[in-house]
Amino acid sequence: MSRSPRPGSQPSRRRFLGMAAGVPLAAVTADLTIGAGAAHAADSAYVMGYFTESPSGLGTDYGLHLAVSTDALQWMPLNQNNPVVTPTAGAGGLRDPFIMRKQDGTFVVLATDLKGTDWSYNSQYIHVWDSTDLRSFTGYRRLKLHDMVTHSWAPEAYWDAGRGRYAILYSSVNSSGHNVIMVNYTTDFRSASAPQVFFDPGYDVIDANMTVGVNGVNYMYFKNNGQQKLVGTRSTSLDPGSFTLFGTPVSHGGTEAPTIVKSLTSNTWYMWGDTYNPNGIFYAWRTTDLAAGTWTELSQRDYTQPLSSKHNTIETITSGEYDNLVAHWGRPAWNRLKSYNFPDRYVRHAGFAGRIDPYPFDPYSDAQWKLVPGLADSSGVSFQSVNYPTRYLRHYSYQLRLDVNDGSSAFAQDATFHRTAGLADSTWASFRSHNYPTRYIRHSDYALRIDPVSTATERADATFSIVY
């Protein structure tokens, strides 16, 4: 759930997606069992739900946000990264949203009833919405799960075919005195059975994420809240108390909120994990053998989380649903630029100087750019600041800085660049100066400048990914 590192704080899970940008959506020819249920044969993309937090709160919002992807790795926020729906009851905000396609093909959205970081707020309820298409949300309500004086953190659900009901997993402090994974069963997400302890290893656990029916085995990952690690369990049944530990735990400096998703085009599984601090950093791992329980961490070159996103959920969708979501909520009117050799850093302005800094930071809008036709040559590109729209990234004495467009020819040329295939990776991008065509934008000691490029290090310094 993404909270400060204290016992009894945090829940999370979901899946991945990739960027739109005109990429054709791959077709899938067979049903795939992923997370809460089976992906439709037509599913070829993904939707992610999340809330947002940023270091000083400028990007913080406790409503439901959506992003889409075609590869479960590169994500495009919808609605300009603004919320698409916000709770109106309980705490008036949400954390840890979960999106699941139900057996009838429609969606249900669940979320923790909590706004902000008041971990002493104990809600016996969770937020619930229905949606046919994730473009509108109806039937908002809160579902009561228990009568205990404790929370209901990070709800997730899956279809239990043997019981003919949905199971809702969440974290609560039971009579044991530490967080355990609880379960309630429901047919309609309007009423639920009495709670049961689903999993209790004897220590504080939160953020259970279920993957059902992979070669007859069910997998549940959770956060060991004491060790700040993601831990795997498995069972051949879905009975409470039947899951046993297996595999090798993973973490990256303290990790929570596991979300597992399978690629729709290969035998690769991805696991996302969130940091427990409010900085909003995701890490990702991959495996081609879920049964082995071992994961390899991905480079941040390989994936891009939505801006300021926390505690994600991922569900598969069809290409038509993908297109409809983009058409309804809109693509971002801005981009970010990720460094190739420092993929945790993004191009930004600070004190009106161009540089690359580690994500996340505030103001987050310092790293948002409108890529507009070049001021001196429309076949090129100029970088217009989102939060200072009269200013553009330009070079001056070979250093890049953010200056007000004075309308001069000299300014237009200094602020115009030509995109080329990435000098270090042709799938990325490099930017050649318009009026100094032997020089490219690169970083040196994290400061941006234009320089001639010849060595492998310089080529890496001059290579960037255009992301959202």
Image: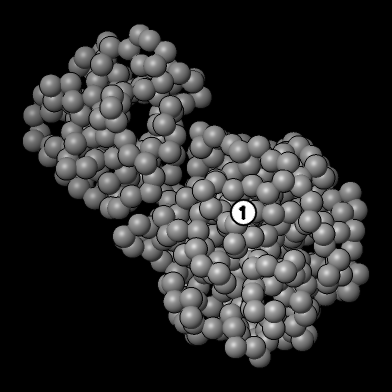
- Identified by mark 1, the residue type is Lys
Residue 468, image x, y percentages: 43, 44
Up the image or down, 56 lies above or below 177; here it is above
- Nearest the viewer among 81 and 348 is 348
* Image mark count: 1
Q: Assign a secondary structure to mark 1.
A: strand
Residue 299, image x, y percentages: 54, 34
Give me the residue at 76% from left, 47% from top: 247
Residue 391, image x, y percentages: 17, 41
Drawn side of residue 300 relative to residue 307, left or right: right
Q: How is the image coloured?
A: one colour
Drawn side of residue 228 relative to residue 382, left or right: right
Give me the residue at 69% from left, 83% from top: 175
Give me the residue at 21% from left, 14% from top: 436
Work out whether residue 353 can be spotted.
yes
- Nearest the viewer among 443 and 187 is 443
Check disc 1: other Cα within 10 Å, few if <14, some if 14-19, many if 20+: many
Residue 161, image x, y percentages: 88, 68
Give me the residue at 43% from left, 38% from top: 344
Drawn side of residue 318 relative to residue 112, left or right: right
Q: Which residue bears the numbered disc 1?
A: 229
Q: Which quadrant holds the N terminus?
A: bottom right
Q: Residue 233 sits in which quadrant?
A: bottom right
Work out whether residue 88 can be spotted.
no
Q: Residue 454 sits in which quadrant?
A: top left
- Nearest the viewer among 240 and 47 is 240
